Amino acid sequence: MVEVLVDLAVGLQRRADVHHVKKPPPRKLHRGHFAFMRALAQGLDERASWDRYLRLEGEHTDLRTVRRTIAWIRDAFAAAARREQKPGTARLILLDPDRFTAAPALPSLAEFAAAQGLEDFSEAEQIEAYEAAYPAGGGGGQDGNKSAGSARPSRRARVIDHQLQALRWLEGLVVQDPRPSDSVMAWLHPSLAARLARAGLPTLVAVVERINGIGARWWAQVPGVGERKAARILDWLHANEQILGLRIGVHVATPRAQLTATALASVVPAATALVPYEKFVLPAELDGSEGRYRAPQAKCLVLAVNDHEAIGAWLAAQRPGEGNRELSSTQRSYRKEAERLLLWSILKRKKALSSLSVEDASAYCGFLADPPSTWCGPRHHQRWSPMWRPLEGPLTPTALRQALIILRSLFAFLVSQGYVVANPFAAVTLPQNPQRPLGSGRTLSFAQWDYIDALLQDHGDTEAGRRLRRGMRWVYATGLRLAEITTIKCEDLEQVEYKAANGATTTGWLLSVTGKGGRRRQVPVPVELVEELGDELARHGFERQVGAVSNQGIHVMARFDMELERPVGWSASGLYQALKAFLAQAAASAEGVDAQQLRKASTHWLRPTHGSHALQGREGQSPAPIQVAHNNLGQASLGTTSMHLTTEKATRLTAMRGFWKSDQD
């Protein structure tokens, strides 16, 4: 198969000028190639030498790869020698020393004398007899040793010596050191390099950035590269770290879940660069201490002396309670917008935040609508990662409107506290708030949810599969926000007694949740979901009773797939990605339901789906009162909750026939 691909590649190269096919860079010879070939020439163990110098090429147990690589190296060496007009050297390098039999081992002079009974003879007489028995020609034409300590090298030994000299000469002539911008095709095995390139890693620096940006399991996102191949790449990069000037972070050697917050924080150092707010260093000349629109320091109500600290004061004022270190989704949204503006102001506009004018605010709107690609990246890259970026891409009108509202709030706070004298974003016109067409709510029908629930039931019985099932069912059953469902813990569940509709006393579960604005509410949870959580706890050595004291601190969305004493919580981004991927798979195999609707669905659809299904009620079941659905969703306005009160078109038309009866008959 490899040979076929090589032939195809050669054919493409010949037609490159006609079809504009970019010629891939040739593989380069590095010092490991020469070290390995010297080891082979000297008869050292082939496997040990391979593992020491060329493990990146593959495992030594893959004999086809080993033989093919050795043949390529010899051909590359010979081609380099021919380019230097050294055809003899080219032939010498291709010569196999094993073709020449090594000279037989000869006895020492003392051994010869003892064997011949010449111990009592003088040394000169012993040497004379030795030379008669082992002439200089090596006995019958073979090269051999002349005498004790004065042997002439065998032909094989001379070939090896000449090869080693040729390799040293050639190494000094053609060996190259890798550079960060070099293509992976130039240094790695062709099949391995092709897999990296297809995964968006065409250069060595791109590979290192991906490794540092993701950590220990960076290879999981590169199809065809498993843990063993990834380890070989890491070994080679470590060996060439000084030459490349690219450092692999120490965090890469440890699974992400086992890294402390301090270890993660040290991955990206503080700098005046495209880094998160908490790591951004203001340059002294643009720190805002002398900002153009700064109010007199004597009238300032906050202790901030620069713009970074002023943003910090605003963010601190948004916290619902003293000592609450975890940011809510709203607070993270506020930080994100202030962070983007601060980075743009310093790195792009070259102005202090407190020096921004109305014209600057308008220019910033244009930037958000068309940011440079270097400022954009996937949202799942976390803040500790070198791959983090402040934007995902151009903001939609809705997102731009929200960003401007938040920035107005930021400057309104700074004005009210006497830090600046005016609000530059107050004069910027907000984009119109686009209204969704009627009937376009992002909800799933009862049939679509039943289809998804059936797929969940048949999902693999692995920890990850059961966690996915738990996550999707809890979101649908409770209507919690993504940020809420990933923060709740076992101690937030309370078992209560209540009277059912038939008057019988029964037990149920309530979940205490802290929502937006620090508002606390209790949401009913189905008994079967709590029992399922208890089963998972027991499966991993914890108390089956969810409310047990020993279970305190364990997240309802805990990850039990890591070898830790206490499981960590599933991140909001991890839950989102897993549910989104599952819904895409469900759409691919959908039969009898709207696959296109499923394909567009995400975690955010389950929350309005909960509201819609609760308010409609299933066939034969009473709908939930709007006040109950309103409490579950934790929305500030009852009017917002009522928007989920939707019905199918046919149902609405049928219901109105009575009103239109005189017109219909």
Image (cartoon, grey):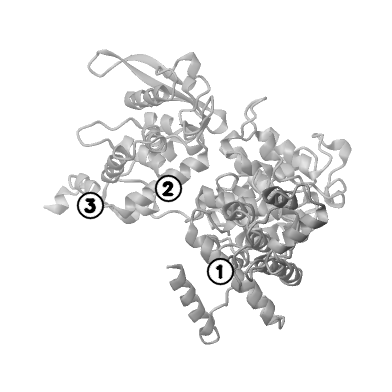
Mark pair 1, 2: CA separation = 48 Å
Mark pair 3, 1: CA separation = 58 Å
Question: Residue 520 at x, y = what percent?
Answer: 51, 25
- Near-viewer residue (183 or 152): 152
- Tell me: 334 left or right of 284: left
| Element under disc 3 | loop
| Element under disc 2 | helix
Mark pair 2, 3: CA separation = 20 Å
- Residue position for label 2: 580
Kind of residue indicated by mark 3: Gly
Quarter of the image where one finds residue 102: bottom right
The numbered mark at residue 592 is 3
The numbered mark at residue 479 is none
- Near-viewer residue (131 or 256): 131
Question: Residue 461 at x, y = what percent?
Answer: 34, 36
Q: Are marks 3 and 1 in contact (CB under 8 Å)?
A: no
